[in-house]
Image (cartoon, coloured by chain):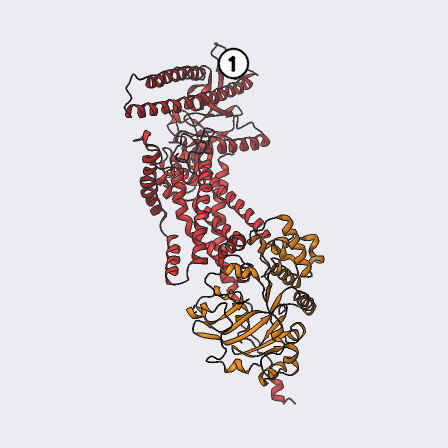
Chain colours: A red, B orange
Amino acid sequence: MATTAEKSKPFFTKNTKSHGEPFVWFTGMGLALGVLMIVSLLALIFVKGLQVFWPAKVAVYTLSETSDARIGSSEVLAGYKVMKQEKPVRDLNAADDHDHTELQLFIGNKEIYGQSFKFVDVADIESSSYPRELIRIERQEYGDAIGEARGLRFESGEYVPATHPEFRQRLHELVKEAAQRWQKIKKIEKGDIGVINRKMEKIRLKKKMLLNSGESFDSPRIEDLDDKTARLQRQYEILAAEAGVLRHHQTQDFLEYQAYTGEKKSLASGGIVDFYYPNQVSLFERAGLFLHRMGTFLTGEPREANTEGGVFPAIFGTFVMTVMMSAAVTPFGVLAAIYLREYAKQGLMVRAVRIAVNNLAGVPSIVFGVFGVGFFVYFVGASIDQLFFKDTLPTPTFGTGGILWASLTLALLTVPVVIVATEEALAAVPRGMREGSLACGASKWETIARIVLPASAPGILTGLILAMARGASEVAPLMLVGVVKLAPSLPIDGIAPFFHLERKFMHLGFHIYDLGFQSPDSEAAKPMVFATTLLLITLVVVLNLGAIFIREKLRKKYATGAF
Amino acid sequence: MEQTLEQEKNLSAPPPSRKMAGMQESEKAKPHSRIEQDRPVIRVQDYNFFYGTAQTLFNVNLTMFENKVTAIIGPSGCGKSTLLRNINRMNDLVDGISHKGDILIHGQSIYDPHLEVTELRKRIGMVFQKSNPFPKTIYENVVYSLRVAGINNRSVLDEAVESSLKAAALWDEVKDRLEDSALGLSGGQMQRLCIARAIANRPEILLMDEPCSALDPIATAKIEELIYQLKKDFTIVIVTHNMQQAARVSDFTAFFYMGKLIEIDETKKIFMSPSIKQTEEYITGRFG
């Protein structure tokens, strides 16, 4: 029986102040901030990186007489807008309604103007137009040229003026021919002559060895070697002459054009990489050009201190190095983790080792680079040279930075990540599964190899993914152990023994640093920095997606959902 | 391990006198009547077991016979699983264990330093409380112990898969999907798969550690039926919490309490007229 007093007392008190869970907002804000920062960074890189390849319209601006952006006495300037910004220093004498913005223009014609970029005050621009005849020429040297084509002067003396209906067709053929000749020259100089050089080097070493072992200069063996050298020398001369002829042809036909500021130029066909008319291509053609330029960037080799051309060697170097690093770090880290987790007696010692491993992940990467130089290059590499490449000394083979040492240095750098991830994965394998295996008469190692490792493979791959992400984007240690600004050849090619582990290589991360901070023309290199950054991020993402794909497959196979 | 040299010498000798210190508890256990006619397989002698300093088994003496089911019952923490897991030395995995006394199988000590523990385990199958199939195909689960023993002949393996799955009453349910993952089976099927795996390499002894505790009554009934079938070929030791199960499936029942063997006798006798009051109280549910 309830009394009236009990009845009037509510079962719960109503909370009139606040509803819900305020910390949802607080914690959500943390995430939102992080996501916002990452997304804006990626968006910036994405937009700026892709802009590089977009064939923008090029305008011709007429400048007012007072403009200090004028070149010589010319009142016009051709270029496309890179960006618009508030002027850093305001003109104090100007009226309040004066336009304080300026344009950064890409004007090209570096050999004429001395620089490819120019800042122009918006207030000084009287008019602008987009002449249809404007041609943009991508050149082997001095970056792009912008101007109006005048005509083609052939070796035969033939002259085709730009107004001729076949002009564009002829120019196109000329550029194509020149590109083919470059291919041939490259094949002769890098391929055939390279082979001869290697053969000669081999003979030279053999001769040196024979002489060292007491053979006299006129012994038949030495004479035989000399004969061979002479024969190779003759072959070389033939090839060199062939290449010389081709090179000569590259300089015989000329494209004549005139910059909008008045200078007349004539450019040999060998100097033209590509050309297009930015103000008369349709949107569809523009998209095609965009893809074409992107393709050239991805597959081409760098030119002009890396500020022009493609980055293929850097992509390839980054890729090969990351794969080699993964191949080195995985077995190393997994074995260490197996010992730590499965065999070692869990005690003070193991805990100390574990703490040390975790701390290793916090050591500045440059320290690893220094260690790589000291240990791998100067100690291991020099010893290898002493043992196997004694003939070529004092020129080092392995005793200098190379892709192998770079990979191993990065493997050391990332091994803590793999160890920690593997240990966690091993610990997550249910005890029941191990006992089941042991009860079947399996030894400890059989249990690890047949049951525990397969079941923890997805976790191990997670560690590898993290290690790859860290290793692929690391630059500082690489600068000490084998990265170069421009590598003459790729670490893997068609010449036996195919894998040249001692070679120096190019790397996208270093490429970014080099372009942005070591380049003679930092303005010209700026777009390339964005493009290369975008590429590096894409490469890391692609590598990670590959590992994630494998991990998901393994997860399906070894799903331990039953526990 | 605190095994003395003397004990090692006695490996094949007849069991030493049971009149040793601390025998009071096991002396209470009445000698079973029919035992002498059966062939003893496992003999536990004055067995003491320690986790670190905590003793979990006190002077256990008992014998298990060929082709019989011996059930071990008792309240939680009484040491029944510990004893079972010592028969195939599964407890070796635990740090800080030690024992006194001996366990003999066919007169041979399982602690013989010349004995490979993997060889011992190959002769003793084990089924765990929680089914623990490997993340492999059904086929590979069954042949695991054969593969470990180095048998890779396909026809031998096929033979073993069929006979073990049939013996585990699982063949009809899985024969068409042997290459599927074992993790897709139901709980009862998984446990029967584990039984098939445990018997695939034809061990002599089968240890079962509460094999039905995680199963529903239908799956339990199937496994109990299976145990009845399996005892024709195996000597079975089963640890169970379920008194009815012990009564149904076993020939002998051992009652443990606080690490001591209180009584062991024919199941019928234990359940109808136990000679010790503690046993009766436990069985009738008055304590434990």
Residue A142 image position (x, y, % from top left): 41, 26
Q: Single out the residue that lies furthest toward the right.
A: B172
Query: Subunit of mark 1?
Result: A
Q: Quadrant of the C terminus of chain B?
A: bottom right
Q: Is residue B271 above or below residue A34?
A: below
Does residue A156 show up? yes
Q: Is residue B138 above or below residue B21?
A: above
Q: Mark 1 falls on what kind of element?
A: strand
Q: Amino acid at mark 1?
A: Val
Q: Quadrant of the N terminus of chain B?
A: bottom left
Which residue is the site of mark 1? A160
**Quadrant in the picture for residue B282:** bottom right
Residue visible at 52% across and 23% down in the picture: A133
Q: Is residue A550 above or below residue A401?
A: below
Most foreground residue, A176 or B4: B4
Q: Single out the residue that lies furthest toward the top.
A: A157
Q: Residues within 10 Å of mark 1 (few under 14, many from 20)?
A: some
Most foreground residue, B270 or A355: B270
